[in-house]
Amino acid sequence: MSEVVKKFMYLNRKAPYGTIYAWESLEVVLIGAAFDQEVSLLFLDDGVYQLVKGQNTAGIGMKNFSPTYRTLGDYEVKNIYVDRASLEARGLSEDDLVEVAWEDWESGEEKENIVEVVDAARVTELMDEADCVFSF
Amino acid sequence: MSILHTVNKSPFERNSLDSCLKFAAEGASVLLIEDGIYAALKGSSVEGKVTDAMGSLKLFVLGPDLNARGFSEDRLIPGINVVDYAGFVDLAAESSKVQAWL
């Protein structure tokens, strides 16, 4: 498509499973991939729990949607940002998070992991830069 | 017989845990379920208040909810016991009533 490309940011602030927000956000990201915009995801506050690896929902009778995060690189998602202070307040580190690989089919450019832990100043900057912020 | 308190909200988003810990009587049991399980994890900013509460309350966490969110027992604050659904039922049966902090 040749139209103007906008920067879409999906802001995720809720833990998975306890409420439907995390899953709904993921659904919208996947649907939004069809619009060929520049998409980034930002995980703040309890949203950082969405990216914790090793989720196993067999015991609670709910769909485990966490493997889907690892495929986001194939759905036009170029950047995934995680707020450092949110991780630290929860006793988590980057090692607890899933890794998301990314590849540009046209240029062949590859990245092993697009999950990036950032500080508060960068979060502010990212929100400023976005044309549109979708909040979940 | 004492009360079984259940907390199903994240301690970082709601004050359900704070209120529960404030009003629960000495010797009562507190079971962390759903997003409440995040309070049971080591190294978080709420670890101190949970550890303090364990001086007068018995703390439990629901295993299936812990595993669903990607955590295993080795991430828990020492002294918090993991129960399964049958254990939840046992706790409820042993208590005079169940009080939910939503």
Image: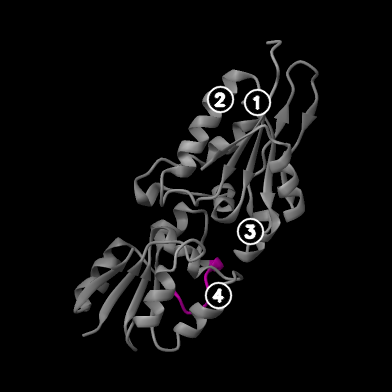
Letter of the chain that mark 1 sits on in the rendering: A
Judging by the rendered image, the residue that carries numbered circle 1 is: A76
The spot of residue A8 in percent (x, y) is 64, 31
Q: Which mark is residue B45?
A: none
A92 above or below B53? Answer: above
Give how far apart the Cα atoms at labels 4 and 3 are: 15 Å
B40 above or below A123? Answer: below
Marks 4 and 1 belong to one chain? no
Whether the residues at callouts 1 and 2 have beta carbons within 8 Å, the answer is: yes
Judging by the rendered image, the residue that carries numbered circle 3 is: A86
| Viewer-closest of B75 and B100 | B100
* Residue for point 45% across, 75% down: B80
The range drawn in magenta is B74-80
Give how far apart the Cα atoms at labels 1 and 2 are: 9 Å
Q: Quadrant of the N terminus of chain A?
A: top right
Q: Amino acid at mark 1?
A: Glu
- Closest to the camera, between mark 4 and mark 3, is 3
Q: Residues within 10 Å of mark 3 (few under 14, many from 20)?
A: many
Whether the residues at callouts 3 and 2 have beta carbons within 8 Å, the answer is: no
The spot of residue B68 in percent (x, y) is 45, 52
Tell me the SS state at disc 3: helix
Marks 3 and 2 belong to one chain? yes
Letter of the chain that mark 2 sits on in the rendering: A
Q: Amino acid at mark 4?
A: Glu
The spot of residue B83 in percent (x, y) is 36, 67
Q: Name the N-terminal-most of marks 3 and 1.
A: 1
Q: Residues within 10 Å of mark 2 (few under 14, many from 20)?
A: some
B85 above or below B2? Answer: above
Q: Amino acid at mark 2?
A: Gly
Q: Which mark is residue A32?
A: 2
| Viewer-closest of A118 and A91 | A118
Judging by the rendered image, the residue that carries numbered circle 4 is: B47
